[in-house]
Image (cartoon, rainbow, N blue to C red):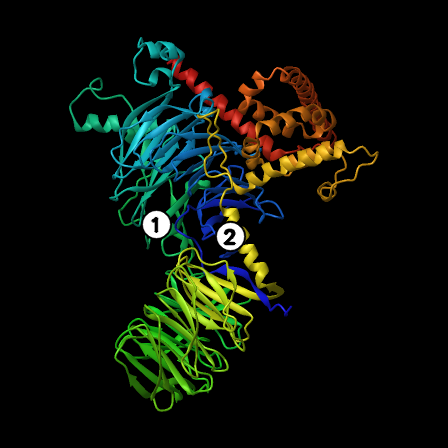
Amino acid sequence: MGLTKQYLAYRPVDSFNIISSGRANVNFAVVDRTEGRFVASPAAENVVVWDLRLGDRKLTLRREKFEVTALRVSPDHLHIAVGYADGTVQIFDITSQTYYNAIGSLALHKNAVSILRYDNQGMRLVSGGLDTELVVIDVVEQAGRQRLSGHNAAITDAHFLQRICEDSNNIVVSCSKDTQIKFWNLETQFCFKTIVDNRTEVWALAFVKDFMVAGAGESGMNVYRLKQREQGDRGTLESAVEGLSIDEEDSISPVSVVNCGVIQRASKGRCVNLVADPNERILSCHGTNDLIENFYICTEEEVKQRLAKRIKKAKKATTTTEEELSQELSLSDEIKRLESIKTKQKIKSIDVLLGLNKELRVLVSLANNSLSLYSLEASLKNRKSSEETSVKVLRSLTRLGHQSEVRSVCFTNDSLAIGSGAAESFKFWDREVMQCLRTVPTDYVLCLRFVPGDRYALLGMKTGKLLIVDVGSGDIVEEIPAHESELWSIALLPDQKGCITGSGDSTIKIWTYELIDSNEQTKVLSLLHKNTLKLEETVLCVGVSPDMKYLAVGLLDSTVKIFFLDTFKFYLSLYGHKLPVLCLDISYDSTLIATGSADRNVKIWGLNFGDCHRSIFAHDDSVMSLQFIPQTHMFFTCGKDGKVKQWDGDSFDKILTLPGHIGEAYSLSVSPNGRYLVTCGSDRTLRLFERTEETIVLKDIQEEEREQMENEQLATGEDNSVPLLPGLKLPSRKTVGSEQAADSIVECLEISKQFEVEDTEKPEIHPLMLALQVKTPTDFLVTTLMRIRASDLEEALLLLPFSTVCEVLERLPVLIAQRPDELELLCRVTIFLFKVHMKPIAATKTMKPLLMKILGLLTNDVNQLRDCLGWNLHGLSLLQTEVEQREGVQLFREATQARRKREKKRRETTKRRLQIQMV
């Protein structure tokens, strides 16, 4: 048997250049008890918590492959819930030392998550998806509770209704692209009220005081007043069905909704976002343009003052008496328009925070990969003049990333720094810390190379110009009008004396380096035009063989032509690609040339005779960039499918696929020492990879990829229905994890049977039991159930056949008796199995004694646990009182003050209501 060829693995280090991606929203976050300074922002597949004061990353919450589509910081600022494009929701604890590990992961939707929203206590989370469904999650249990289906289009917003009445704790309000606003009862999982008076898609909802504001596809925002329906006004369900109290569906609704007006926005087009601050005093909205409109929600005293002022003004203007004037409140009395904020770019998302002295802070995520923090005064005072404004830009994060997609990347010759070019600038990055060192404003950069010595960089522009940039000072030394059309490619000559450029004007030019005197008595680099090769087709890429013998040119006619470098005499034509050749590279020993094309193939040719060694179907879309690793025949490719792959040019094998870009990958660069790789793509990230000492064997990698593909397909199919329960809608979604969990339960029961059947005094312990460090079948089954994720448990139990369910139920009395420490888990399993298999269990006569036994055991244990919790709670409160009396210090002062403030507010509200009633 021959030796197996081994390779060293490249692994991702980190991604940089991205500040905020536009698909998800941004949120203020609290870190180290500091409010208004930190923001949580989506960055492709990660979430970055930025420190706006220092302009640096504080935390990074990572996940591979799928883009972040929604995020929400919990009301207690301890957790961040993140929704992804595959329908998964992950919850991170940002106060923990291991903040980067998700404390819970739930597969909820078939498509991307569109909205996440916590309730006031942060105990529940509602998630809306593009699959038209809503899922309510219990954050503590980390499992779904209800799945709400009824909308006909993607969910755009959802809120818990917790401000109107006692019943409203179990009400969720949602809106969708189907133009409807629905009110859901979580106990029955049904919609009890639908508002259909919007003519266009409803994009956002906001709740302030007793108002509900709906932002739709028009410039006007509908405002609804929500009130608790009195018991006498509410008809019973029976009377509504019989038609005795016909008031549409309102006869059984605990909430009455009245349309009380329209807020007219200054900007045209649809409303994208509606955001209210946590105290519900400010409402901000924006559309598809660059204008943020802010509204102030007046207090009751301010409303009375504005009403009196309006009546007084109306009496002066007209001769009508006071009785004839309207004493009723209008929407303009309760909501006042504040100053609008005009941004420099199109807005993607906003968040607001009202601070001390009525300072309003507005966090804005812009379409050009930047974050801005604005400040303005939120008061009822009118400005003296239209030119006077209180809007200020407090912070702005722009320097840390390109404001457009990066088209080209390149390593310096010492492998310590990276250059990147985009539509608006060239940036110079430190590879070690991944920080931007220099930014040079330019036109559209198509390609770039560093000159030997790394002091200067050559930039090929879309206009055909060739720019020489001094990296140290960040200045453009010279602009050379090199070509008449796009300058697609720059190749450095191996003798380090010049370079070659290829352009869309069908010419190739050779340049030599020249040091010329500048005004400051120092010499600067310039380029001297030496020779021109005119071709019949557009030049897309050029390359020079390291032995300075050949010049390779990729053309628009799908061929690669090879010329002698010294005479420009034609040598070979490599034809075989069906679409234009976009990239090429020549190996270090000038024996191989690899070409990548828009036909998705990579071809490896011999440079001596022009013979095609192998054609490889490399990517699912155009191959955009290709480069050999120095001193090897291995090379990297990246394509418009976003993937980055490593290949062996001798055996023609694919070595590995690296985690690529979300969207398209445009360019890559391998460092001269072969240790690092950097790529850029349409997701605005620069991704850095490093070669490790980890060896990989091709067969192992291929086996892993095959297993991964198999795992992506569910063995039991996508169908989620239960034969005996056609209307069952579980809040969870079937995943590979739930299938594996069901298999592990079945396997555990089989091993337990074998263990109990063996006659020997000391039966041999199964290897799986040894691995889990258990010695009895009871502990084995409990440990197996504990290892199943909370979000996968119900789906796993649903997949079990009825015979296995009976076995689990028979073992439950022993489990409850021997493992009271896992009472909560055993209760969940018992209740769910009874709920799903109630009919066949009830039909089995032998099950009745077992049911009574389980019921008695569970009732007894739950009562004991409740008594234990109550004892501990009152014991701790007694200890707290003793410590406070002895030390003279109040414990948990902040929490106590917050509670007292809430109680004081509630007492004042009650007192005010009594006064109004008396009047």
Q: Is residue 349 above or below residue 453?
A: above
**Residue 330 seen:** no
Q: In terms of depth relative to the viewer, which is nearer, 413 or 508?
A: 508
**Image quadrant in which the N terminus is located:** bottom right
Secondary structure under badge 1?
Answer: strand
For mark 2, does the 10 Å Cα neighbourhood hold few (<14), some (14 to 19), or many (20 or more) residues?
Answer: few
In the displayed structure, would residue 778 be above or below residue 559? above
Residue 76 at x, y percent in the picture: 54, 37
Residue for badge 2? 64
Q: Nearer the viewer, residue 752 or 791?
A: 752
Categorize mark 1 by other alpha carbons within 10 Å: few (<14), some (14-19), many (20+).
many
Q: What residue is disc 1 on?
A: 347
- Pair 2/1: label in front: 2
The residue that appears at 53% across and 54% down in the rendered structure is 706
Give amino acid for label 2: Glu
Left or right: where does residue 182 sit relative to residue 592? left
Q: Which one is nearer the viewer's eye here, 495 or 871?
A: 495
Identity of the residue furthest to the bottom in this view: 567
Q: Residue furthest front?
A: 1
Percent coordinates x, y for residue 96 in the rendering = 61, 45
Task: Say whether residue 828 is left or right of residue 671.
Answer: right
**Which secondary structure, mark 2?**
loop
Q: Which quadrant of the figure has residue 224?
A: top left
Q: Furthest-left residue in view?
A: 319
